[in-house]
Image (spheres, rainbow, N blue to C red):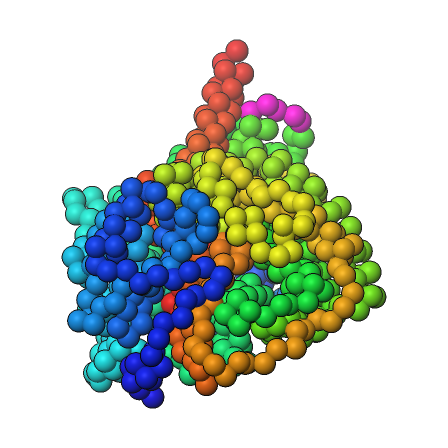
Amino acid sequence: MNFASKQTAAQPSRPTCLPWPREVVDRAGWLAMVESLAKGERALLSLWGESSCVHMALLEQREPPLRIVTLECPDGAFPSVGRLHPPASRLERAIHDLYGLKPEGASDQRPWLDHGRWGVRQPCGARQEIDTTCDRYEFLRAEGEPLHQIPVGPVHAGIIEPGHFRFSANGETVVRLEERLGFAHKGIDQLMSGASIERAAQIAARVSGDSTVAYSLAFAQAIEAAFDVNVPPRAIYLRALMAELERLANHFGDIGGICNDAAFSLMQAHCNLVRERILREAASAFGHRLMMDRITPGGTLVDLKPESATALYAMTDWIALMTPRLIALFGDTTSLQDRTVGTGFVSEALVKQYACGGYVGRASGRAFDARKAIGYAPYPHLAFEVGASNEGDVDARVWVRFDEIRASLKIVRQILDETPEGPIIAAWALPDDWTREGAALVEGFRGDIFVWLRMRADGVVQRCHLRDPSWFQWPLLEAAIKDNIVADFPLCNKSFNCSYSGHDL
Amino acid sequence: MNFLFDFVAQGAQMLLVLALSPLIIGFTRKLKARLLRRKGPPIIQPWRDLIRLLRKEVVLAENASWLYRSAPYLIFAMTWVAASLVPTFATGLMFSWSADLIAIIALLGSARFFLALAGMDIGTSFGGIGSSREAMFGSLAEPATIMIVFTVSFVAGTTQLSEIAAYMAGNLELRASVGMALVALLIVAIAENGRVPVDNPATHLELTMVHEAMVLEYSGRYLALIELASALKLLLYISLIACVFFPVGLARHDAGLQAMAIGLGAYLMKLAIGGFLLALFETSTAKMRVFRVPDFLGAGLMLGLLATLLVFVTRSL
């Protein structure tokens, strides 16, 4: 399938993106944006490519909160964003690997997702066939007499996702950590192009399994924005209910996992008990433990029965009872506190520069939450507090999770109280008029998930870009582990719990 | 006839420690699982694992030297001999006269030495990390152990472990120095056996491992031998603590079958209590930072030193 030819055929005119405008800028406009990013006047939400243009999503400090700019690059190159604004660097390298668009003047031009194993270069661009021999990859150097390297992964001793970590250590002290990701690449961008809405929704739900609800919701919201679909109120509430259940389950799993990495398995045993109950209630209420494929553009596929609502009430009561005990167990276990306090510090300046969302950002003083900042329905109608801390260490990331658990419990209660009756899916049909574009920013448990998509006139997805929050969290993990000891890495890593699958696409 | 009985008793002791050591591992695992509201594998699971490993093919790194291949046998043999020398159900068995407490400590020290060398032999980074951490812990644990040996030896007037145990059984009294030595020995035992909070035997995290990191490249029968040796070491330390500090029910070598049976029953009780306390302690604490371990072991060393001094002072007055 030749993506490039399809692309040009379907672009006779340029519709604007909904609900946030997309504007085409020239080189000077692009560079001005890059400079303002470097100055910190706006934050980078995402950077993605198409066959002959690059797009950049920006978070503004005024209305509208989100802005998308596009630069045409017919000669296959664009001025590098990462040159002045480092958070864009890996996104640019991924664009080059997939679309062959070259970031001019980028300081780091090594491949990122492409390890030379695909049998093809630039699979979304020129599609040049190559032999599948692994590329040589130059890790950044750390030199000095006492330094030694520790390669870890991509195959780990535990059952986790693949990723390679190269430590340069001075004895036990980490001097530099360099990540190498891309092992979980599965070509989501190519799969999305040309997919029908149903299939694209399924692919989106499988980008990162632990955030399947959030991804489905983000994809659905982008489609609904593009086609101006009015989602029934009941569906809006049910979606939020699923999203909060997913958040609760993941946060409990994470807290247990962090404590288990400090060999405190008691906490994990308790947390897994709570998580399991949430998953089972989700299975009986919505028919799937992780609630995969329950949300569809236009609404939801399953309704909440009254008896399930009663069961969910009972569950929130029980969790509300358990949470203070878990908090006490975590906070009063001094041996555990000794491990988490002060470990893996991330500064506020860094999280602001990287516009890092989720618990990583919130634990270091960046109180961004798409549920509040974008305020998609039904969250403006619900009362809840977003967790925040300025400590920036592993401990703070656990406490922020506890805050979010409390907030989510509150939200779930309100949703169960207030969910209106009515239909759960909107009747809508694809209009056969025009190519449409939509975007959405949804708060998953890890942070804000950004989706941008363009639909072709024949009702299939032309290009869908899904940006996982991990893109801006992975680089900060490298900063967090610096000057810590090697043995504390698993603890830091688990406190970030970045997605490999969502990042490698 | 007496000779034959002694010989059989000694043989029974050697086989007993071998048979029981994987079971004590299985027992603590089971207890830990129950404490965490899990069912846990059966107690004999470590034995099944060992048999499975013995049947499996050995995968060796290309650059593995003779040291790497011979280390498991050496480690196993040294640990087994050391474990057989510690009185379990009876004191004064046949071989107990061949080596004293210092020799037991030296055997364990040699086993550690070979394990650390084997960890570095292949040249993987994890083995190196494990060996360097083990060397750091060992350099503090061994002096502490020697101090404890001095304390109990001064109290009992001999370094012969059987004699010490017999003396302790015959002179049941509370001594501050012996109490300190007990606490110090508990600290050393936790560190030496790589238990929480010093090391986590159940971890899957390569970067936090100590003992497991050194043996990460071992497989098949080599791994089985090393696992069995580390199980023997745990049993040895529990037996050591039991026979020196809680010598209740210990039989004398010439006491006859009935006394030995009582001794065996008491020994099994002590093992169960030891395993239970270990499991309880392990579930209630998190692992400490690698650089916090020297403080922990330093406390053990200081207690050992204080205990020795106390014995000296009370003696001379």
Residue A6 visible from this viewpoint: yes
Dividing the picture into quadrants, the one containing residue B16 is bottom right
Above or below, comparing residue A81 to residue B197 in the picture: below
**Residue B215 vs residue B8, the one in the foreground:** B215
Residue B166 visible from this viewpoint: no
What is the span of residues highlighted in magenta in the rendered image? B173-177
**Residue B189 vs residue A337, the one in the foreground:** A337
Q: Main secondary structure of the magenta part?
A: loop
Residue shown at 64% from the left, 71% from the top: A299
Above or below, comparing residue A410 to residue A224 in the picture: above
**Residue A263 vs residue B317, the one in the foreground:** A263
Residue shown at 50% from the left, 70% from the top: A226
In this rendering, position of residue B126 left or right of residue A26? right
Q: Position of residue B192 (x, y in %)?
A: 46, 45
In this rendering, position of residue A227 left or right of residue B205? right
Which image quarter is the N terminus of chain A in? bottom left
Q: Position of residue B115 (x, y in %)?
A: 36, 55
Residue shown at 22% from the left, 85% from the top: A129
Which image quarter is the C terminus of chain A in? bottom left
Q: Position of residue B265 (x, y in %)?
A: 71, 52
Q: Residue furthest top?
A: B317
Residue shown at 54% from the left, 16% from the top: B314
Q: Position of residue A189 (x, y in %)?
A: 39, 75
What is the count of numbered marks? 0
Above or below, comparing residue B248 to residue A16 in the picture: above
**Residue A328 vs residue B240, the one in the foreground:** A328
Q: Residue furthest bottom?
A: A1
**Residue A336 among magenta residues:** no
In this rendering, position of residue A476 left or right of residue B145? left
